[in-house]
Image: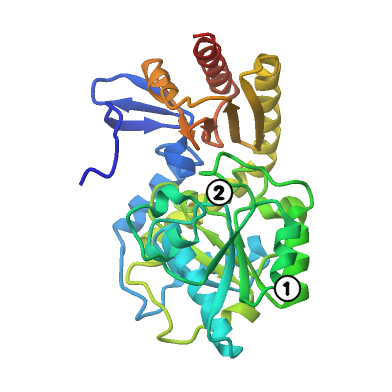
């Protein structure tokens, strides 16, 4: 179906931060499959793990015990500080599980019309429930009637959140991204997540943090919410957890997780031996190579270089980011820069129409990082001079 406007290139192999197309041309990847291949293409540790596992056992279903899934759940609980994990296959499914968990918890409290507070500018997926939770009218177009039970608020606005207490709504949870990725790499004010945590605690609401794009060391911490030492009730992860092998997880504390019982939810493929082994290899690699510290350092360097090169240009509204999640906001639509970069054998992305989004592999070399900065700055300068 014509659901994508694909670029005129087809890749056949990759290594680290580079991809090779069907004509033998090399491309520097500053997008990582949209923050998926965080430890690089064809990572040897992941390749070895999935190759060995594929020769042993790929799938059995959740009708049976899956030891690798149990091991992965334990590691995820250690990293997040939470208690229980539900396994699925994608970010949208992880967010669906979180939404269902909030509603199940609400009904157990006697609430018959539960409502989840969500944010303008957010993106949570394209299933009917997750697109209804998404704060973007373009995502909603053509899919009405939307799923009820979501109340949209301005992002980074605690006053708007506190006003909900006065309204006649059965609020059960607040769901948000610690940094809005699809919304344009939007960082909230310092202290915002902590304030949301406090408001949720005061009102017995669940706090749900969507870490699908920001999680797994992308921002210089295992989870972006850890920058403010915030412990949500529910965290969702996917994308880079499998470095390209589809996997999603909904992690919850005991208080939230107890709402689910056998039969409440399920997944045929979720957490199967192959996906679990891949994710364990990803976590092992990130731990052994101390990626949070590396990403924090490289991110600061990359941001500083962009600021030195572009901050003097009035057409560049903002240069922002956390770790290796960087957004360059222009004062005009700049979607054409994606194809211009492709002509230079560089893969970038433009989101929210005017924000150049960079999500390079966390394993990128400083030399390759210099190439990205140089090309992007030159593209921007040529573009704004037209």
Task: For mark 2, give the secondary structure.
Answer: loop
Using the rendered image of the protein, determine whether residue 70 is visible from the camera's viewpoint.
Answer: no
Residue nearest the viewer, comparing 276 with 51 = 276
Residue neighbourhood size for the residue with mark 2, other residues' Cα within 10 Å, grouped as few (<14), some (14–19), many (≥20): many
- What residue sits right under mark 1 in the picture? 166
Residue 238, compared with residue 361, is above or below; it is: below
Q: Residue furthest left?
A: 1
- What residue sits right under mark 2 in the picture? 121
Q: How is the image coloured?
A: rainbow
Residue nearest the viewer, comparing 10 with 363 = 10
The answer to whether 296 appears left or right of 274 in the picture is: right
Residue 246, compared with residue 353, is above or below; it is: below
x then y, percent, for residue 151 = 57, 65
x then y, percent, for residue 89 = 39, 61
x then y, percent, for residue 197 = 74, 64
Q: Residue at x 66, y 28 (%)?
A: 318
Write down the quadrant of residue 262 in the picture. bottom left
Q: CA distance from mark 1 to mark 2?
A: 24 Å
Q: Residue at x 40, y 18 (%)?
A: 340
Q: Nearer the viewer, mark 1 or mark 2?
A: 1
x then y, percent, for residue 341 = 43, 20
Residue neighbourhood size for the residue with mark 1, other residues' Cα within 10 Å, grouped as few (<14), some (14–19), many (≥20): few
Q: Residue at x 73, y 62 (%)?
A: 196
The tag earlier along the polypeptide, 1 or 2, is 2
Task: For mark 1, give the secondary structure.
Answer: helix
Residue 371, compared with residue 233, is above or below; it is: above
The answer to whether 3 appears left or right of 328 in the picture is: left
């Amino acid at each position: 179906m014509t659901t994508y406007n694909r670029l005129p290139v087809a890749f056949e192999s990759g290594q680290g931060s580079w991809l090779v197309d069907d004509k033998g041309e090399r491309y520097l990847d500053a997008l990582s499959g949209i923050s998926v291949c965080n430890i690089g293409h064809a990572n040897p540790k992941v390749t070895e793990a999935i190759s060995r596992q594929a020769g042993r056992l790929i799938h059995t279903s959740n009708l049976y015990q899956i030891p690798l899934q149990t091991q992965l759940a334990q590691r995820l609980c250690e990293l997040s500080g939470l208690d229980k994990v539900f396994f699925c296959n994608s970010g949208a499914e992880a967010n669906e599980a979180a939404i269902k968990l909030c509603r199940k918890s609400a009904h157990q409290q006697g609430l018959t019309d539960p409502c989840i507070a969500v944010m303008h500018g957010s993106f949570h997926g394209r299933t009917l429930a997750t697109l209804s939770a998404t704060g973007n009218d373009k995502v909603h177009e053509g899919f009405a009637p939307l799923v009820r039970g979501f109340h949209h608020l301005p992002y980074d606005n605690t006053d708007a959140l506190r006003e909900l207490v006065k309204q006649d709504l059965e609020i059960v949870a607040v769901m948000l991204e610690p940094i809005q990725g699809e919304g344009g790499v939007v960082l909230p004010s310092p202290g915002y997540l902590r304030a949301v945590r406090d408001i949720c605690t005061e009102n017995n609401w669940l706090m749900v943090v969507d870490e699908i794009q920001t999680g797994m060391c992308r921002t210089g911490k295992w989870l972006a919410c850890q920058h403010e030492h915030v412990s949500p009730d529910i965290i969702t992860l996917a994308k880079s957890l499998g470095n390209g092998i589809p996997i999603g997880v909904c992690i919850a504390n005991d208080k939230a997780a107890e709402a689910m019982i056998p039969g409440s939810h399920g997944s045929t493929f979720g957490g199967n031996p192959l996906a679990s082994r891949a994710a364990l290899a990803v976590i092992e690699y990130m731990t052994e190579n101390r990626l949070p510290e590396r990403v924090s350092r490289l991110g600061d360097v990359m941001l500083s270089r962009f600021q030195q090169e572009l901050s003097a240009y009035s057409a560049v509204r903002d240069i922002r980011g956390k770790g290796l999640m960087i957004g360059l906001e222009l004062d005009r639509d700049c979607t054409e820069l994606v194809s211009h970069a492709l002509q230079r054998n560089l893969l970038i992305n433009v989101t929210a129409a005017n924000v150049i989004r960079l999500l390079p592999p966390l394993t990128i070399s400083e030399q390759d990082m210099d190439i990205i900065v140089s090309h992007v700055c030159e593209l921007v300068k040529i573009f704004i001079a037209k």
